[in-house]
Amino acid sequence: MNVKRLETSRLFHRFGFGPQPGEYALALRDGVTATRARLTNVPLGQAADFPVIEPEISDLGKRPKANSPEVVPFSIALRNQTKQIELWWLDMMVLSDHGLTERLVWFWHGHWATSIKKINYALPMFKQNKVFRTHALGNFYDLSKEMLNDGALQLWLDGQDNTVKAPNENLGRELLELFVLGVNRYSEDDVKAISRALTGYQVVRSNGLVTINQKRRDAMPISLLGKTAVFNGDTLIDFLVAREDCATFIAERFWYRFISSTEDMPSSFAAKKAFASRDIATAVQAMAADSSMQDTKFSMVKSPVEWFISVCRALELTPSALQTTNQLMNFLDKLGQVPFSPPNVGGWPAGQSWLSSATAQYRLAFATWLIKQSDLVALQQIPREARVLESADWLGVPEWSARTQSALRTAVDDPARFALLALCSPEYIVSA
Amino acid sequence: MDTISRRKFLSLTTGAIAVGVASNFLTLDQIAEAAISRPLPSDTPILVVVTLYGGNDGLNTLIPYTDSIYFSSRPDISYKPETMLPLDAELALNPSMTGIKSLWDQKKVAIIRGVGYPKPDHSHFSSMAKWQSASPEKHVSSGWLGRWLDSQPEDPMLAISLGSVLPPMLAGNKISGSALPLGGLVIPKGSLANQCIKLSTPAPTDSNLMAAAATSMRNLFSVSTSIQPVLKAPAPIAVDLPTVNGGNAGGDNNLSQQLDVVAKLIAAGSPTKVWSVSLGGFDTHANEANAQAELLGVVSTSLSRFLSQLKSTTRSKDVTVMVYSEFGRRVKGNASQGTDHGTSGPMFLLGEKVKGGFYGDQPSLSKLIDGDLAVTTDFRDVYATVLDSILKSPAEQTLGKWSGRANFLQPD
């Protein structure tokens, strides 16, 4: 396989959500170094004419009693808000002029995986998403501190039930295992200790406002990973994030979500060393330049949302304008991935889990539905005799196999069918 | 059975699907014909695996109802003794498990007590990975039933999971089980079908994951063609339950929907030896007693309904159900009327082949290890017995060398 095509394809599909028509061919002309620098720079701010309008999500207040007359309008408002933030986020992923930021927001959402299904309010989830946006490529100390004070995360892991009288270990354990250090890098005693240090948080469910109730807080010193001290949220994060294990763990998570979910991370993986200052952008840039980016061994399955967003970009579709958005959410639900609703605190599945016969069927139906709503300009512009080979550039695919070429050849005269086969091909479902 | 179509089918399912091997493909119609024309031979044992995600609290499932430590450890979340369903002088079932209690009385339930693995892991993900891979000491990415599939002639119908995401348990190194969403599959027809079959032919340049993507599309044709007509038929009637409009009441929760589909397909003779269904929500850190009773009620009602449905088929005696969760929970309750992650818990095996009763020792509440129950039975003992005696496949092939067995089946 042509290494330049491979690396360029990975830059688009893994460090963004795929190229828009024409971008891939242009990037091949620019070369890998220039393309990498362009796609992984850190933006100064959002363009003034940004096309996605941020929704206004109001505080709906306490949920009315079941069977009361107020509960119906409340439920409708909640449903509307949930849909608004889902569509807003999908639009951001498709239309943002900075794919890397969107990609990192998506990554952090899967990392600090919180589900709206338990929170039952849109506002705290919306606020959490904005925390990811602010710190997506910032400093991991800052991000982690903000996350301890994030109402949605606290509610999700029963933080408000964790009191001096009897700690609830849910948040403490996941902080060590899934958010900062990684499994087996602490003892069960550390879980008990950290849970004590995390007592006293209280959250207003409807708006995610976090406060500390000193009366519910355990202010005694704890012994955590060899250090005995009285910790508060900030000093706890300072202590944990500074540990070598944190750099290893975040590098492992980057590896798993950006390079390979099936092969182990080699110790030479550049992101680990580059995370020394805990600056996220530096580590991500090092990862994009790592030699693993050229190794064909490290293919990655696109999750349903990743696949859908890249299809929207290729077909020039805007999620919130699709007819109908209810059907859109239904397709994502069938494929098992609705933003803001990860299945559990471990985040989204990866790799082969997305490759069942069931997802194959839904993907075909979903793609057919999307293609109907696109005029397929970019594809139509390719002369039919060049369509099979040049469509790889349209989609940012390094190369079509002989198998896929022969399938595409049967549809050169039918652009809709051609697009369907291309978008559901193994080479497009999987980032080579 | 038509021997020609059978031979054609086997030539498709064995050589053709191996990663990276190019071969000729049959037409869709031939695949459909072959799949429908080879029902599971009668008397073939069938395994139904029920996974309870989140860590089911074993102590509130199988309750040591005469042990005062149980009540003093978790005053907020223990049940009233008079509501529990005693099985003997020491242990009772959760008040909501009336269906399983009645099966127990019929000697169709084996309860393996204190099941876990060495060095219990309190992480949902690590622990579930250990259970599903059956490799608690060393991380492997294949599942135990996936490795069993590896040892079988490739057949996408052999192991089927309900729902659209495949559990790791069914992912082998070479071969994986199939996933079947509720409501069934709609397969492409006509020219699109032919194009999809072309598009999912193995290509020598495929990476492993691309090969898997191709296989998943190919399986769509073989699995769904044979299953689709069956899904449209009504579920078998549960002979022991009252009928409403020709069907049974209930079946509105997700687990019983999954089991309904499984019952239909078993009744129709689907050539499937392993089924996987699941129920989530067992991570009861807060307000446990009601939530867990509700979930266990669903498990109990769904399973007793399922086994009852099978009675109106010829396969009732062939089916064994196995229920497990990734860990039990801490003995002592927390301040949120819930429990934190623990260690061992009971496994349930149900069916006509099962020799009802208790197996393994009940972990003592007075001899806790760091506040947790001891593990008295390794889950691999149970798996090994399942492999040997239900799947009729040497356990060693899948589990490596493992001598332990749990003797919960009737002699053949």
Image (cartoon, coloured by chain):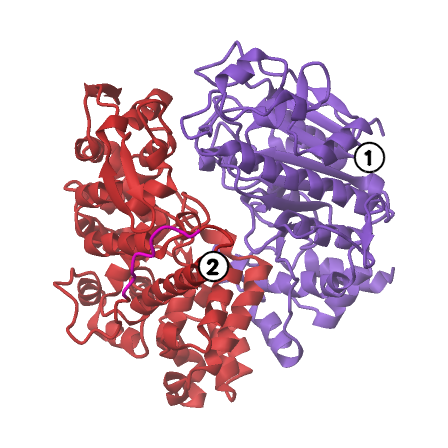
Chain colours: A red, B purple
Q: Residues within 10 Å of mark 2 (few under 14, many from 20)?
A: few
For the point 37% across and 39% down, the residue is: A157
SS for tag 1? Answer: loop
SS for tag 2? Answer: loop
Q: Which residue is mark 2?
A: A69
- The chain letter for the residue carrying disc 2 is A
Near-viewer residue (A118 or A93): A118
Q: Residues within 10 Å of mark 1 (few under 14, many from 20)?
A: some
Q: Is residue B92 above or below residue A362?
A: above
Task: Please state the extent of the stretch shown in magenta in the rendering.
Answer: A56-64
Q: Specify the amino acid type for callout 1.
A: Glu
For the point 38% across and 33% down, the residue is: A170
Dominant SS type (magenta): loop
- Reply yes or no: does residue A60 show up in magenta: yes
Q: Is residue A293 above or below residue A390?
A: above
Q: Quadrant of the N terminus of chain A?
A: bottom left
